[in-house]
């Protein structure tokens, strides 16, 4: 009974080693530099696609889309995108006892921006479930997911690689 369990654990360990080698490949400097260069482009494409989903659903819908409850999740997600990217990454990584609360303020700001982001997801699900048409509800949810995906891609892509503290794609 010990032998089959050992075989299962060995197989799991081999898969874990394979995953870590793939992770090391993703974190290699050429791949990280490519992601930093193309990250703003991918982020902008996601942001534009999100608003395109919503504009297409509003113009092609047979039902008149009310402005306030239906447009609100997209605007809140856009505000969350701006708030998430207002925090510099190095403020989150280093702690200094004499930094006058920058470490705590930046973490609190990032937490608040994530709360706002997830509230926009909740609002989009509410539009999907209680909205006038299913098409606009799905488009609203896709819009919010794309905008928040753009926020996360841009936040990760603007991290400096090997001391480069500028955007390489501009």
Image (spheres, rainbow, N blue to C red):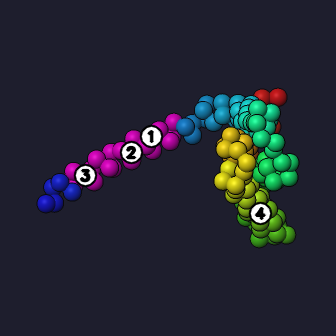
2 or 3: tag closer to the N-terminus: 3
Which element type, helix, strand or loop, lies under badge 1?
Answer: helix
Q: Which residue is mark 1?
A: 21
Q: Is residue 57 above or below residue 105?
A: above
Determine the CA span between mark 3 and mark 1. 20 Å
Chain-order first, disc 1 or disc 4? 1
Q: Is residue 10 above or below residue 56?
A: below
Q: Answer with mark 3 or mark 1, whichever residue precedes in sequence.
A: 3
Does the rendering let one see residue 97?
yes
Q: Is residue 92 visible?
A: no
The x and y percentages for residue 137 are 70, 46
Circle 3 Cα neighbour tier, 10 Å, few/some/many (<14 / 14–19 / ≥20): few
- Could you say which disc has been placed on residue 17 in the image? 2
Q: Which residues are magenta?
A: 6-25
Q: Which residue is at 16% across, 60% downward? A: 2
The x, y position of residue 38, in whole percent, is 70, 30
Alpha-carbon distance for marks 1 and 4? 35 Å
What is the distance, in whole Å, between disc 3 and disc 4 at their CAs? 43 Å
The mark lying in front, picked from 2 and 3, is 3
């Amino acid at each position: 009974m010990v032998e089959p369990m050992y075989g299962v654990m060995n197989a799991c360990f081999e898969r874990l080693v394979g995953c870590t080698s793939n992770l090391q490949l993703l974190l290699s400097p050429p791949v990280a530099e490519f992601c930093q260069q193309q990250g703003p482009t991918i982020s902008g494409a996601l942001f534009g696609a999100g608003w395109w989903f919503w504009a297409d659903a509003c113009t092609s819908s047979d039902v008149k889309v009310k402005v306030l409850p239906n447009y609100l999740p997209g605007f809140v997600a856009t505000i969350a995108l701006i708030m998430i990217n207002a925090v510099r990454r190095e403020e989150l990584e280093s702690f200094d006892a004499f930094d006058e609360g920058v470490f705590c303020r930046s973490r609190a700001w990032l937490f608040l921006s994530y709360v706002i982001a997830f509230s926009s997801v909740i609002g989009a699900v509410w539009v999907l479930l209680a909205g006038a048409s299913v098409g606009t509800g799905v488009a609203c949810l896709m819009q919010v997911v794309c905008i928040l995906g753009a926020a996360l891609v841009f936040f990760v892509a603007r991290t400096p690689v090997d001391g480069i503290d500028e955007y390489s794609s501009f």
